[in-house]
Image: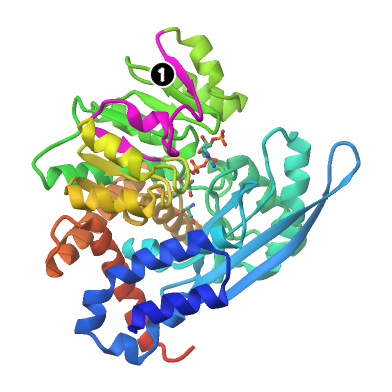
Amino acid sequence: MDYIHDTLSGLRATSPAQSEFYQAAEEVLECLRPLLQSNPRYHEHSIIERMVEPERQIMFRVCWVDDHGRVQINKGYRVQFNSALGPYKGGLRFHPSVNASIIKFLGFEQIFKNALTGLPIGGGKGGSNFDPKGKSDGEIMRFCQAFMTELYRHIGPTRDVPAGDIGVGAREIGYLYGQYKRITARYEGILTGKSLNWGGSLGRKEATGYGAVYFAQNMLAARKEDLRSKTCLVSGAGNVAIYTIEKLYQLGAKPITCSDSGGTIHDPRGINLETLKRLKEVERAPLTKYAEQHAESTYIPKGDYPDDGHAVWRVKADAAFPCATQNELTLSDAKALTHNGVYCVSEGANMPSTADAANHFIASKIAYGPGKAANAGGVATSQLEMAQNSSMEQWSLEKVDAKLQAIMANIHQSCATTAEEFNEPHNLVLGANIAGFRKVADAMIEQGVC
Ligand code: NDP
Ligand code: 2IT
């Protein structure tokens, strides 16, 4: 039996029924084999057993009153995974699918992602199985207030700083912040993704999507290519997808798809960004409305493909940007993509490719940027928001964007050079996992047994 195998078996035994978490842990640990062989001190210090066990997991009841006066109950979570490099940092997800496995996989990924940014932030994640869909503004506010009424005691500007994720955007961050302030009487940077006129950073809203495109630019530049005139597939229609599409247009590419939980839009002339923003950021409407307003587009409802396939990945293109959710791109999708000529995949979402889909991209030697590297621009800009809050400054958009571009270039560089160091040039999954792990593991050893 070996160290990695034993650790993964131990994980399954002590944390049962957490498939997404095992998937994330297995990917990282399997990539570490060559590093652990050449550096026995990680084993000597039991680093990987420590790394897969969160420092702290908080689960709580969230009770709130709906518009009919009925008491509703949801589960709340905050997993404070690793603080070796800084205060816990990571988003909150509100979605009915949220459970302990999903929050742990997201928190685990966040450790290495945050390390790759080179900034002083540890890894954490939280959320609730609350479904914001169809809720009134008053219900959203009362839920957020109830959620923060428990969460406030666990967070702080140098302790744990949550942000948004699926189902949590500027509106929810506002209600969460207001309740923290009401309870504690403190006006401080305990959340990022805040509105611009009360402590938010210019460029944070755009950062994850822009960053995923900058990462693709870096991968392509290493192959003497660029995004100009490239046809691109984007999944999702939320924060990350919208600003991925915006940056693709700015760089001369043509994004022709987007999707939501109901289905996919294929617009061969290019997605109309103005319509998409209005539908999703203002009206909170389904994508069926897009098709009604753009006769040249096609709407393909979900579930049209066998073996879990997704319509968005069946369109011919040059590059793909999965920006919706975990495991939204299966092996059959991955094969369809490479068969149809896609040679660049940059993940805006967290773990959007299943393990076998990711392995297919690696084996195909296409430019493949895994989420923990490619979508790190969001959390990196969150840390820039923290820096602005603590110095009571507000930086210009140009300054924030220049820093974001430099951070994404550095992340690419560190993944690529680490991949080369371990004799797998172009395997950015291996590069990202080893580069992120090494930073956190070395800090843990230096800080002693804790
Ligand atoms: P949003 O809530 O703004 O948008 C999510 C989008 O994905 C929506 O279009 C939603 O459709 C779709 N979606 C969500 N769940 C499912 C599902 N189970 N099946 C099909 N479609 C689904 O979230 P974000 O854009 O912020 O997040 C998207 C991804 O990016 C997530 O993986 C998140 O973890 C990751 N990410 C986000 C960052 C950020 O800064 N926001 C930073 C780094 C990564 P519908 O509205 O119909 O549910
Ligand atoms: O997955 C992620 O990196 C996020 N949802 C953003 C986290 C953050 O703290 O900005």
Quarter holding residue 68: top right
| Helix, strand or loop at mark 1 | loop
The stretch in magenta equals 296-322
- Residue 356: give x, y in percent of width and height: 33, 52
**Farthest top residue in view:** 295
- Residue 377, x across and y down, in percent: 37, 50
Instruction: Look at the image and say whether residue 309 sits in the magenta stretch.
Output: yes
Q: Position of residue 224 (x, y in %)?
A: 8, 41
Compared across the picture, whether 232 is left or right of 291 comes to: left
Task: Please tell me in which quadrant of the rendered image residue 213 appears.
Answer: top left
Q: Is residue 125 magenta?
A: no
Q: Quadrant of residue 137?
A: top right
Q: Is 131 positioned to the left or the right of 408 in the image?
A: right
At a point 28% along the width and 39% down the height, the residue shown is 335
Task: Give the residue type that dot 1 points to.
Answer: Asn
Q: Residues within 10 Å of mark 1 (few under 14, many from 20)?
A: some
Q: Nearer the viewer, residue 381 or 65?
A: 65
Residue toward you, 338 or 116:
338
Residue bearing mark 1: 272
**Would you place residue 388 above or below residue 29 in this image?**
above
Question: Hey, which residue is sitting farthest left in the picture?
Answer: 224
Q: Is residue 38 above or below residue 166?
A: below
Identity of the residue drawn at 64% across and 58% down: 187
Left or right, 304 with reference to 375: right
Q: Is residue 168 visible?
A: yes
Q: Is residue 42 above or below residue 290?
A: below
